[in-house]
C-alpha cells in the first residue's frame, strides 16, 4: 500500500531528475558554439517498482544517464574527408606556385626566351658578318640560360619550402598524438569509474580531426574506450596511453624523409598536409619531376646547339670544334637548368658559317642552328623544344586544374559530412528551448506534488483533532 | 533532419565564399579580356598558346628575313639595271665605231668611253648592301672584282629561311652574272669582252669590232637573263610577305579563340554572379535571428 512519504520521495526524485535534465540543457546551450561538442541528452528511467500484495507501485524516476549523441561512422567519414582535404590543399598550394613560374597565359615562362634565342640565329642567317646580330645571339642565349636558371631556382624554392614544411607538420602530428594518448587514458579511467567520458571523447575527436588534417589516419576504437591510431599504411601513432613519434631526417638528396620507429615511411604517407607536401615534392607530377623535365629541356637544347655550333666555322674562319655555345653539366642532364650558361663571350666565336674562309658571309650553320627550333631533339622523346615545353606547361596546368576540382569536390564532401555530424551531434537552440520548457513544466509539476503531499500531511497530522 | 545553427552558419559561409569566387573569376576575365589567366584555367589552351606564340615569333622572324632579303635583292637588282644600261651603251658605242668612217682620234675617244663603261660596271659589280658585297657569293667581306674584272668572290650563295621549310636565295654569285672565265684567274667574260672591244676600237680593227659587239650582246643577254631571277625572287618574296602577315593574323585569331574571353558572356555571367552574391548576403543577414528562445518568458 502506498504511503505519503513514498509519494513525497517520488516527487523529490522527480525534482532532482528534472534539475539534472535542466543542467544538461543549460550545458548544451552554453556549448552551442564549442567546436567538436556533442550535445548531451538526459536519459530518464522509471525506478524499479515495488510490489505489495497484488499491487505494483511505480517508484518514480531516475536520471539514469547523460548520453553524448554522436555517430562514429559519420565521425570517421569526417576524419577521412579532412585528411583528403588537407592533402589536396597542401598539394594545390605548392603546385600553384609551380604553375605561376610557367604562366604562359600572362607571358611568363620559357617560350619567349626559347623563341627569341632561335630567332636570333635566324636573324644572324640574314647577315652572318653583322657583329650586332652576333652579339644579339649571345644576349638571347644569356636570356634563355637565365630564364632556365630562374625557373629552376623557383622550383628549388618550392622544394625547399616543402622540405621545411614536412618537419613542421611532423612536429604538430607528434604533439597531437601525445595529447590523444593522454586523453585515451582519461577516457579509459572515466569509463572504468563509471563516469561519463562524453566530453573527453569530444575533445579527443576534435584532436583526431586536427590530426587528420595533417596526415591520414586509421582509427580503431577498443572496448576500453581508447583509440588506436595508425597512418593509412599502418605505422603506429597512438596505442592506448602511448604515442609513437614520427621523426624526420634529411637524406643524401637534401630531401627530408619521415620515419616511424626507424623505418622510412615517406612514400607510404597519404592524406593530410603532410601527404600533400610529399605528393607535391615527390609525386609523378610534383616539383622534383618538374625540375627533371626542365633539366632535360635545358640539356637537350644546350647539347643540340653545342653540337651544331661545333660543326661550323666561327667569324674568324676557325672550325668551332672547341667553342661550345653553352656550358652544361658534364655528367648528363642533372642540374642542367640550374647551371646552364653561355660559354662564349666574343661574338666572333659564333659558328654561323658552314664553309671555310673566305666564305665569311656563309650562313649555312646559322640556318642550321635556327632550324633546331623545329627539330625533334634527342632526350625530348621525339619532340621539338617548344612542343616538349608546351606539353610540360599543359601538364602543370592539368595537374593544378585537377587538384582544384578535387579541392572543390572535397570541400563539399567535408561540408556535407560536417553538416551531417552537426545535425546528429550539434546543439539546436529550438530543441533545447523546448526541453527547457518541458523540464521546467515537469519540475513545477513535481513541486506541485510536494505541495499537495505537504497539505495532505498537514491534514493527516490534524486528523481527529476536530476543528 | 535536425538543423542546427552552427551548420547553417558554416554552410552560409562556404556558399558565400564560392559565390565570391565566381564573381572574382568573372571580374578577372572581364578586366583582362582573357578566359585563360593561369595554366589551370584551360591547360590544353595554355599548351596550344605556347605553340602558337612560338609560331607567331617564327612568322615575325620570317617576315624580318623577307624584308632583309628584299633590301639586299632590291639593291642588287637596281645595280644590275644599271649594268644593263651600261652594256647597252657599250654596244651602241661599238656600233658607232663599227661604221668605219671615224677618225683615229674619234675612235680613241670611243675606246676610252668603253673603258669608262667597264669601270662603271666593275663599280656596280662591287655594290654593297649594309656593308656586304652583294655579288661576292658568300665571301661578302671580300671585294669581288678588281679593276680588271677578275672575280675574287666564291660561287656559293646564302639561302635565307622565309617560311616554314621555305628559303630564298640571296642573289647570285658575280661570276654567274658576268660569266666565269674559261681559265681561272682571268677576268670574267663580260669584262674580257669589254676590254677586247675597247682594244679593237682603239686599233680600228673593224672585223673584230663586229665580233666584239656580238660578244658584248651575249654578255648583256646573260645579265638580263640572270637579273630576271632577281625579279622572280622579289615577286615571290612579296607574296611570301603577304602570306606571312596573313598567317600571323590567322594565328592571332586562333589565340583569341584559345584564350580570349567572350565579353558578352562574361558580362552576363558577372552580373548574374553579382546578383547571386547579393542574394546570398541578404540571406545571411536574415538567417536564424529567430529561435524558440525569443518566445520564452
Image: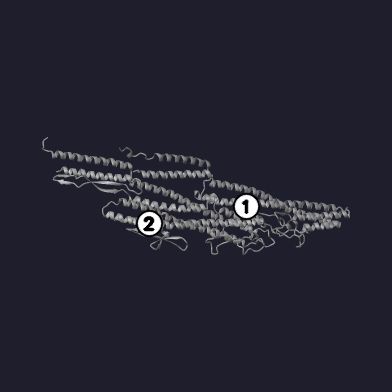
Which one is in front, B209 or B262?
Answer: B262
Where residue B68 sits: x, y (%)? 67, 52
Residue B14 figure quarter: top left
SS for callout 2: helix
The answer to which of B2 and B103 lies nearer the viewer is B2
Q: Does residue A107 appear to the left or right of B154 in the view shown?
A: left
Spatial distance from mark 2 to mark 1, Cα to Cα?
61 Å
Judged from the image, the secondary structure of the residue bearing numbered disc 1 is helix
- In the displayed structure, B178 sits above or below A13; it is below
Q: Residue A89 carries which label?
A: none
The quarter of the picture where the N terminus of chain A appears is top left
State the residue position of label 1: B61
Residue A381 visible, this orientation = no
Residue closer to the observer: A371 or A3: A3
Q: How crowded is mark 2: few (under 14 residues within 10 Å), some or many (20 or more)?
A: some
Q: Which mark lies nearer to you, 2 or 1? A: 2
Q: Mark 1 lies on which chain?
A: B
Q: Is residue A268 left or right of residue A311?
A: left
Q: Is residue A320 left or right of residue B193?
A: left
Which numbered marker is on residue A175? 2
Q: Residue furthest top?
A: A467
Q: Are marks 2 and 1 on the same chain?
A: no
**Residue B290's x, y, as percent?**
35, 39
Q: Which residue is drawn at 28% across and 54% down?
A: A190
Question: Where residue B98 appears, x then y in whole percent?
Answer: 85, 53
- Quadrant of residue A267 in the image? bottom left
Amino acid at each position: 500500500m502506498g504511503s505519503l512519504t513514498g509519494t513525497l520521495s517520488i516527487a523529490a526524485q522527480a525534482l532532482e531528475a528534472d534539475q539534472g535534465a535542466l543542467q544538461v540543457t543549460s550545458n548544451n546551450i552554453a556549448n552551442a558554439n564549442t567546436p567538436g561538442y556533442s550535445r548531451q541528452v538526459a536519459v530518464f528511467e522509471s525506478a524499479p517498482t515495488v510490489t505489495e500484495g497484488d499491487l505494483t507501485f511505480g517508484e518514480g524516476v531516475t536520471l539514469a544517464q547523460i548520453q553524448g549523441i554522436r555517430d562514429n561512422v559519420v565521425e570517421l567519414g569526417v576524419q577521412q574527408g579532412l585528411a583528403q582535404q588537407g592533402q589536396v590543399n597542401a598539394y594545390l598550394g605548392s603546385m600553384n606556385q609551380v604553375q605561376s613560374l610557367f604562366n604562359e597565359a600572362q607571358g611568363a615562362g620559357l617560350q619567349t626566351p626559347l623563341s627569341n634565342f632561335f630567332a636570333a640565329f635566324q636573324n644572324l642567317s640574314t647577315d652572318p658578318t653583322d657583329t650586332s646580330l652576333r652579339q644579339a645571339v649571345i644576349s638571347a642565349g644569356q636570356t634563355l640560360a637565365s630564364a632556365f636558371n630562374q625557373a629552376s631556382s623557383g622550383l628549388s624554392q618550392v622544394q625547399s619550402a616543402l622540405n621545411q614544411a614536412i618537419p613542421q607538420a611532423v612536429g604538430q602530428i607528434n604533439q597531437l598524438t601525445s595529447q590523444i594518448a593522454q586523453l585515451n587514458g582519461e577516457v579509459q579511467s572515466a569509463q572504468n569509474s563509471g563516469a561519463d567520458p562524453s566530453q573527453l571523447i569530444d575533445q579527443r575527436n576534435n584532436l583526431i580531426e586536427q590530426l587528420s588534417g595533417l596526415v591520414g589516419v586509421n582509427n580503431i576504437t577498443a572496448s576500453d574506450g581508447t583509440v588506436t591510431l595508425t597512418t593509412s599504411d599502418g605505422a603506429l601513432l597512438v596505442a592506448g596511453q602511448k604515442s609513437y613519434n614520427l621523426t624526420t631526417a634529411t637524406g643524401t638528396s637534401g630531401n627530408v624523409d619521415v620515419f616511424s620507429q626507424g623505418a622510412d615511411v615517406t612514400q607510404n604517407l597519404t592524406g593530410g598536409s603532410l601527404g600533400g607536401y610529399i605528393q607535391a615534392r615527390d609525386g609523378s607530377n610534383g616539383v622534383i619531376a618538374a625540375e627533371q623535365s626542365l633539366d632535360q629541356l635545358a640539356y637537350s637544347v644546350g647539347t643540340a646547339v653545342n653540337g651544331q655550333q661545333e660543326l661550323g666555322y666561327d667569324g674568324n674562319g676557325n672550325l668551332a670544334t672547341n667553342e661550345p655555345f653553352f656550358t652544361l653539366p658534364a655528367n648528363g642532364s642533372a642540374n642542367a637548368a640550374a647551371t646552364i650558361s653561355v660559354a662564349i663571350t666574343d661574338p666572333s666565336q659564333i659558328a654561323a658559317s658552314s664553309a671555310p674562309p673566305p666564305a665569311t658571309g656563309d650562313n649555312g650553320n646559322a640556318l642550321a642552328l635556327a632550324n633546331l627550333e623545329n627539330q625533334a631533339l634527342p632526350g625530348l622523346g621525339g619532340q621539338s623544344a617548344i612542343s616538349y615545353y608546351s606539353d610540360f606547361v599543359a601538364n602543370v596546368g592539368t595537374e593544378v586544374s585537377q587538384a582544384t576540382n578535387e579541392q572543390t569536390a572535397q570541400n563539399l564532401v567535408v561540408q556535407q559530412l560536417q553538416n551531417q555530424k552537426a545535425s546528429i551531434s550539434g546543439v539546436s537552440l529550438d530543441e533545447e528551448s523546448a526541453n527547457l520548457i518541458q523540464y521546467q513544466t515537469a519540475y513545477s509539476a513535481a513541486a506541485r506534488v510536494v505541495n499537495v503531499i505537504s497539505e495532505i500531511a498537514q491534514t493527516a497530522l490534524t486528523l481527529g483533532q476536530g476543528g | 533532419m535536425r538543423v542546427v545553427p552552427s551548420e547553417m552558419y558554416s554552410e552560409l559561409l562556404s556558399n558565400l565564399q564560392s559565390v565570391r569566387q565566381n564573381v572574382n573569376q568573372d571580374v578577372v576575365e572581364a578586366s583582362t579580356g582573357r578566359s585563360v589567366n593561369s595554366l589551370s584555367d584551360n591547360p590544353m589552351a595554355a599548351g596550344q598558346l605556347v605553340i602558337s606564340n612560338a609560331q607567331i615569333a617564327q612568322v615575325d622572324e620570317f617576315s624580318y628575313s623577307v624584308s632583309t632579303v628584299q633590301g639586299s635583292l632590291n639593291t642588287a637588282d637596281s645595280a644590275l639595271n644599271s649594268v644593263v644600261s651600261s652594256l647597252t651603251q657599250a654596244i651602241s658605242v661599238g656600233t658607232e665605231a663599227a661604221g668605219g668612217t671615224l677618225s683615229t682620234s674619234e675612235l680613241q675617244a670611243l675606246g676610252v668611253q668603253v673603258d669608262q663603261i667597264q669601270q662603271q660596271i666593275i663599280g656596280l659589280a662591287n655594290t654593297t648592301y649594309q656593308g656586304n658585297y652583294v655579288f661576292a657569293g658568300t665571301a661578302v667581306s671580300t671585294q669581288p672584282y678588281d679593276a680588271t674584272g677578275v672575280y675574287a668572290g666564291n660561287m656559293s650563295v646564302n639561302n635565307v629561311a622565309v617560311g616554314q621549310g621555305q628559303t630564298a636565295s640571296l642573289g647570285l654569285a658575280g661570276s654567274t652574272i658576268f660569266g666565269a672565265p674559261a681559265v681561272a684567274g682571268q677576268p670574267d667574260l663580260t669584262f674580257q669582252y669589254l676590254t677586247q672591244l675597247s682594244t679593237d676600237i682603239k686599233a680600228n680593227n673593224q672585223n673584230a669590232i663586229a665580233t666584239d659587239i656580238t660578244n658584248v650582246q651575249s654578255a648583256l643577254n646573260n645579265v638580263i637573263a640572270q637579273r630576271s631571277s632577281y625579279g622572280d625572287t622579289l615577286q615571290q618574296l612579296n607574296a611570301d610577305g603577304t602570306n606571312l602577315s596573313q598567317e600571323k593574323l590567322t594565328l592571332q585569331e586562333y589565340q583569341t579563340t584559345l584564350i580570349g574571353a567572350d565579353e558578352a558572356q562574361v558580362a552576363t555571367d558577372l552580373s548574374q554572379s553579382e546578383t547571386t552574391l547579393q542574394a546570398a548576403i541578404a540571406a545571411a543577414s536574415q538567417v536564424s535571428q529567430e529561435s524558440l528562445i525569443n518566445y520564452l518568458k
